[in-house]
Amino acid sequence: MVQDLDGETARLRDAGPLARIELLGVPAWTVTRHAEARQLLVDPRLVKDIDAWGLWQSGVVTHAWPLIGMIDAGRSMFTVDGEEHRRLRTKTSQAITPRRLEAIRPDIEKFTEELLDALAEQGKDGVVDLKSVFAQPLPMRVVGMLMGVEESEHAMLTKRYKAFFSMLTPHEERMALLAELDVFYAGLVREKTARPTDDLTSALILAEEGGDPLTEEEVVGNLKAMVAAGHETTIGLILNAVRALLAHPDQLRLVLDGEIPWETVIEETLRWDTPTTHLLMRFATEDIQVGDSVIAKGEGVVISYRVIGRDVEQHGPDADAFDITRPTPIRHMTFGHGPHICPGAALSRVEAGIALPALFGRFPGLRLAVPDEEIRKLPVMTQNDMEAFPVLLNG
């Protein structure tokens, strides 16, 4: 499944707007079309609350299910709905504003240049891994700076998140990783409560608008999920854009010649090769009619963003093609839609908008060091992530 995303995408798309799937023995629906996803993502009858899941209520699904940690991940704006979601999200919005993003732009540019220097040093004698040296540490540095996480902790967090998402990690180990992350973030919250600084963690603790202050559990839940989303998505966006451009040198030339803006590259990459493949999970609080199908009360629904990005009804018969010359704007929903739209979408775009032109500006002769078909995906169900991305910097 993971190694053949194109094949999986085609099969799910052919199954119709709603497809029946099985997630490690657990039945669910998945949404595969843009219009239907847009409809369902604003439907208040489809909620994040795991207690609305019939299989959870009946005990068929328990904490022994290997994917439970991706759904029952603690209380945060990612796991609640309605007024409670608005309360938790409002406080996050106070911390990630357009003004704050603009203020940290020089820091992102500085991090980018430092990592490009490291890339040049490590790649001066041959092959270098673009992922581990550049695409992975950049968003972790940025989100770490935003959250007030010391750089000495970045490698630890990266390792734990990778192990958490990997399908090869034993279930008991995955649940232990969640507990370790809870302990780490609880310590961070207590430190920032005692000595607040100019970072998002302190802002979440001190935010005054939007109802009652957040509890420690709520701040921890928000941080745990936001760090994951804040760096994983951007890793995929940067690497997928580089891979697409190297596979389409005629389009790369248009960008390097200034005929197509980098913003268009970013949006077409987000549509065509989404950083998030499938998002687990929402639950129906009553029967929901979608075309000829009915999502029954209590059933689970997955949002298959990669398939949605290849929807021919939304993007035309050439939806499977990477094409930065297609008519703009490119109307995708890779960062979601409705109340739960990704709060870090703007940050990811800013990072990619700095990283990609800087990378190709420094190394215009960049190319893959192996045939494209040898690039291996990580064994992850929800992210479109690569094991490594070996390149030669000067062709």
Image (spheres, rainbow, N blue to C red):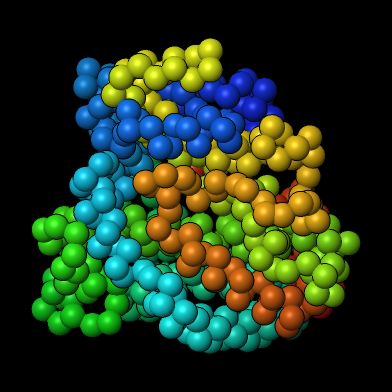
For residue 89, which quarter of the picture?
A: bottom left
Q: Which residue appears at 67% of the width and 37% of the height?
A: 314
Tell me if residue 212 comes above or below residue 391 in the rendering.
Answer: above
The quarter of the image holding the N terminus is top right
Q: Nearer the viewer, residue 171 or 3?
A: 3
As drawn, is 40 to the left or to the right of 7?
left
For residue 302, which quarter of the picture?
A: top left
**Residue 387, percent across and down?**
59, 55
Q: Which residue appears at 67% of the width and 79% of the height?
A: 358
The quarter of the image holding the C terminus is bottom right
As drawn, is 153 to the left or to the right of 135?
left
As drawn, is 259 to the left or to the right of 311?
right
As drawn, is 342 to the left or to the right of 150?
right
**Residue 18, percent across and down?**
53, 22
Total tally of numbered discs in the picture: 0
Q: Nearer the viewer, residue 209 or 49?
A: 209
Tell me if residue 214 comes above or below residue 16 in the rendering.
Answer: below
**Residue 365, percent across and down?**
83, 75
Tell me if residue 146 comes above or below residue 223 in the rendering.
Answer: below
**Residue 45, percent across and down?**
32, 28
Q: Which residue appears at 68% of the width and 83% of the height?
A: 120
Question: In the orientation shown, which residue stands out farthest toward the right?
Answer: 250
- Residue 70 in view, yes or no: yes
- Residue 153 in view, yes or no: no
Tell me if residue 287 comes above or below residue 200 in the rendering.
Answer: above
Q: Which residue appears at 54% of the width and 71% of the height?
A: 351
